[in-house]
Image: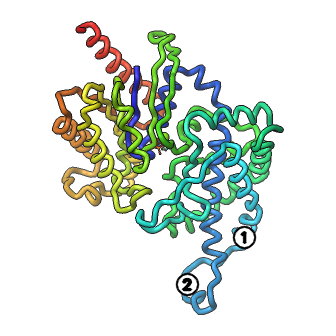
Amino acid sequence: MRMLLLGQAESGKSTMLKNFQLHFAPKAFHTEVELWRPVIQLNLVRSVNVILNVLSSIHDTPVDAASRRASTRPLSPDGHRLLRMRLAPIRQVELSLNKALSAVPVEQPPASAGPATLLDGPYGPLDVCVRSGSEWKTRVQEQMLFPGRGAARGELVNAARILEACREDIIALWEDSSVQATLRTHGVQLQNQPGFFLDQAARVAAHDYTPTEEDILKARIRTTGVEEYRVEMETATEKGEAWTLYDVGGHRGQRAAWAPYFDDVNAIVFLCPIAGFDQVLSEDKSVNRLRDSMKLWKTICKSKALANAKFILLLNKCDILKAKLDSGVKFSDYVTVYEGGNTFEDVTSYLKRSFQIIHKEYSPRKRELHVHFTCAIDTSMMSVVLTSIREFIVMDTLKELTLV
Ligand SMILES: Nc1nc2c(ncn2[C@@H]2O[C@H](COP(=O)(O)OP(=O)(O)OP(=O)(O)O)[C@@H](O)[C@H]2O)c(=O)[nH]1
Ligand SMILES: [Mg+2]
């Protein structure tokens, strides 16, 4: 069985892959748990450094007396200055973890993408970008076994030691109400960013930290190119079988690499992060995320190379969509043709219908479509969804084999 995961950046493709491994190959998944520690710690320190950047941009920019009087900027409280000083080594932790993971710099969005935000800041966006495939896992494993060897000698140990020493200050920084207020004023919403672990800093920064399943699903690494994973199934019905999954990079610059993988796949899983209705693409800030996803869906539905593949659509990030609607964000402010209510039920049934219509209209031939509403970081929900997806793919493929 060959399955292709498609969708825009941050739609949840790699998270779906992790769920697949967890559900069908749990033993293999659990042997790799420790390897995720530096990735999650890097996610955490990136967020800390974003906050430090925001505080520096406020307190360190020289201002003349007149503009200081006119300014509404808060003066630097001594507490902030002290915390910033004590957390200065966190920059070194980011460098060490980058080195240990062989992380490559994430390219800054082009000027045409729109004005840079603080999240694009001088220390790069929050995304962690490592060399493709499982190469990073091999590197981390080697360093865990032989910490004194190689180019990244001692970096993991150093990073963990400094992080532990800064643990209380990281917690104090995140819990400080004036820091929270400053972030709000500057429109920096770290809670909604992928790879957010600040609320778990006490655990993640501890020297004996072991990632949980949930941490691994929440960890963020940007995929580059197309990564091939062979999953040896461990569950009763498929034991011994191997499924091949292709996980693609969803950024616009990565999408040209998808087409060669269209021939010969049994199924595609397309993920649309429906919570992105009020967001724009990081690579082009003039494009709404939901609109981009629908356009991409149309292209995928039209593809002749995929005409015989089973189609599965995951309307993902339902948890964030619900929280946004409940907090009063109006769906119709962003999707102006929408005339329904602002409830989760109304919005999701409108979205499902819209995707189904595109599929029906643009598919080269009549084809069944399986749709699920998902929260890819919820393992129990994903376990039910994966069981249903497997049945859909396997049963239909068996039917075809019998007919042949
Ligand atoms: N709250 C929430 N977070 C999710 C959900 N699905 C994925 N995420 C998080 O969103 C982030 C992005 O998910 P990824 O799986 O890395 O996205 P991707 O589609 O592989 O992105 P690229 O590799 O850039 O193409 C990760 O930090 C995930 O943990 C969801 O349903 N709810
Ligand atoms: Mg990915």
Q: Where does residue 179 sit, x and y in percent of width and height?
A: 61, 65
- Camera-nearest residue between 293 and 235: 293
Tell me: 32 left or right of 113.
right
Give how far apart the Cα atoms at labels 2 and 1 are.
Answer: 19 Å
Is the residue 83 above or below the residue 397 in the image? Answer: below
Query: Would you say the residues marked 2 and 1 are in contact, meaning their CB atoms lie under 8 Å apart?
Result: no
Amino acid type of disc 1?
Answer: Arg
Q: Where does residue 44 sit, x and y in percent of width and height?
A: 63, 49
Please tell me in which quadrant of the rendered image residue 353 appears.
top left
Please tell me in which quadrant of the rendered image residue 257 appears.
top left
The image quadrant where one finds the N terminus is top left
Is the residue 243 above or below the residue 145 in the image? Answer: above
In the picture of the structure, the residue carrying the numbered disc 2 is: 71
Q: Where does residue 296 sit, x and y in percent of width and height?
A: 31, 45
Q: Residue at x 34, y 39 (%)?
A: 315
In the picture of the structure, the residue carrying the numbered disc 1 is: 81
Q: Residue at x 44, y 29 (%)?
A: 382
Amino acid type of disc 2?
Answer: Ser
| Disc 1 secondary structure class | helix
Is the residue 276 above or below the residue 370 in the image? Answer: below
Q: If you read the primary sequence from the N terminus, does the residue marked by circle 2 or circle 1 appear first?
A: 2
Q: Please identify the residue farthest to the right as the structure is shown.
A: 148
Q: Residue at x 60, y 67 (%)?
A: 54
Structural crowding at the residue carrying mark 2, measured as other residues with C-alpha within 10 Å and reported as few (<14), some (14–19) or many (≥20): few
Is residue 319 at least partly visible in the picture? no
Please tell me in which quadrant of the rendered image residue 48 appears.
bottom right
Is the residue 253 above or below the residue 398 in the image? Answer: below
